[in-house]
Amino acid sequence: MWKDWIRPLVRPLPQWSTIALAPPQHAVTATLRWEGSSADVTVDHTVASLNPLVIATSVDAGQHAVLEYRDNKTSRLLGVLHLVRDPLEIEAPSLALYRVASGEHYCLSWPRRTWNAWLQNRLMLKHRSSNGLNTDPVAVQQLMVAYLCPKPVVLVAVNTDEHQNLFPMDLIGPLERSGYFSLALRSTNVSVPILREARRVALCHVPATMKQVVYQFSAHHKNALTDWSALSFPVRSSREFGIPAVAEALRVQELTIVHSQEIGLHTFFICRVVSDEAGVQVAQLHHTAGFYQDHRRRRHVPFDEV
Ligand SMILES: Cc1cc2nc3c(=O)[nH]c(=O)nc-3n(C[C@H](O)[C@H](O)[C@H](O)COP(=O)(O)O)c2cc1C
């Protein structure tokens, strides 16, 4: 069809693709390389802040490092981020922070890659005030490279006597070697002061079928929840903290917050996992980069899109 041919010429690929995936993802491996050394950081790197774009890891890779994302089936290099050690002091000596200096992906062939980035950037600048990311197109392009490793989506449950809330997050993850688990939350989120004080939270790993609900709950980044009983789905108490958690979650993890630090527009929470309860075994909602889904679609192995 001529429309299939003309579409990529005039319309950019979506930045993100929402997919259904059984966790943990085994599609992509992330490797950190520096001065002749390398380490698998697939479950040992997270986004600490979007603006500036900062990556946290428990691997000390010196001053300059390269983060590579590779497709496990084909061994093909999908994208790279060039990292520079961030001088920011952090009260967790086993963690290193790296600023993203530059990045590129190889999911599209050269002319299309450049053209698609140009179309995406033009659209971002047009909708700058409403894109929710508060960062410039170059950093968003680099962030998309970080999403080559599909990121699981959770609903974060917060509950104190005065405040309750449930909102979606995907800038989360384990920092395996140090045993930490981190969350990067925009400092304007209404629950940030409560999290800093209460220091406890429950992560509900949500089924892909809950996508609509999850997106509706992004409003709760700005407005706290008024009443747990008003939810359209059942909740049950988390094991140790008794925080209301999504009953149909694949997994509920309770975290204690051991340290929090503002980095740019985000608050970076460093946590320890207190409990980890398995629930239903279904596909989880994930986000990946739109150009990776397009690359897989052209190879006839797309992720299930929801
Ligand atoms: C699925 C999903 C995951 C999100 N993950 C995060 C996150 O990890 N950290 C964060 O600060 N905000 C996260 N957000 C919130 C958005 O970035 C944004 O702040 C929120 O939707 C409010 O948008 P607005 O400020 O444009 O109104 C997420 C939103 C959605 C829908």
Image: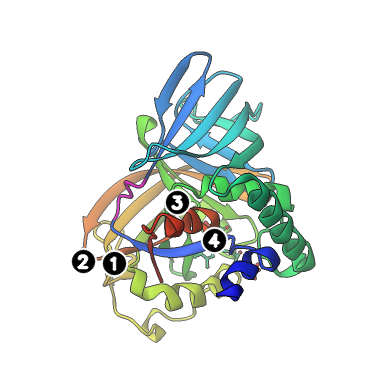
Which amino acid is tagged 4? Trp
Q: Nearer the viewer, residue 276 or 214?
A: 214
Sequence-first tag of 3 and 4: 4
Label 2 neighbour load within 10 Å: few <14, some 14-19, many 20+: few
Q: What is the x, y in percent for residue 65?
A: 56, 24
Instruction: Pick out the residue farthest to the front.
Output: 2
Sequence-first tag of 3 and 1: 3
Q: What is the x, y in percent for residue 143?
A: 60, 48
Q: Quadrant of the N terminus?
A: bottom right
Q: Check whether the beta carbons of the residues at disc 4 and disc 2 lie within 8 A of each other.
A: no
How far apart in space, not on screen, are marks 4 and 2 (Cα)?
26 Å
3 or 4: mark nearer the eye: 4
How far apart in space, not on screen, are marks 1 and 4 (Cα)?
23 Å
Question: Which residue corresponds to mark 3?
Answer: 199
Question: Which residue corresponds to mark 1?
Answer: 249
Question: Which residue corresponds to mark 2?
Answer: 280
Question: Can you tell which mark lies on residue 16?
Answer: 4
Q: Secondary structure at mark 2?
A: loop
Q: Check whether the beta carbons of the residues at disc 2 and disc 3 lie within 8 A of each other.
A: no
How would you classify the magenta stretch by its main secondary structure? loop
Region in magenta: 23-27
- Specify the quarter for ligand 1: bottom right
Sequence-first tag of 2 and 1: 1
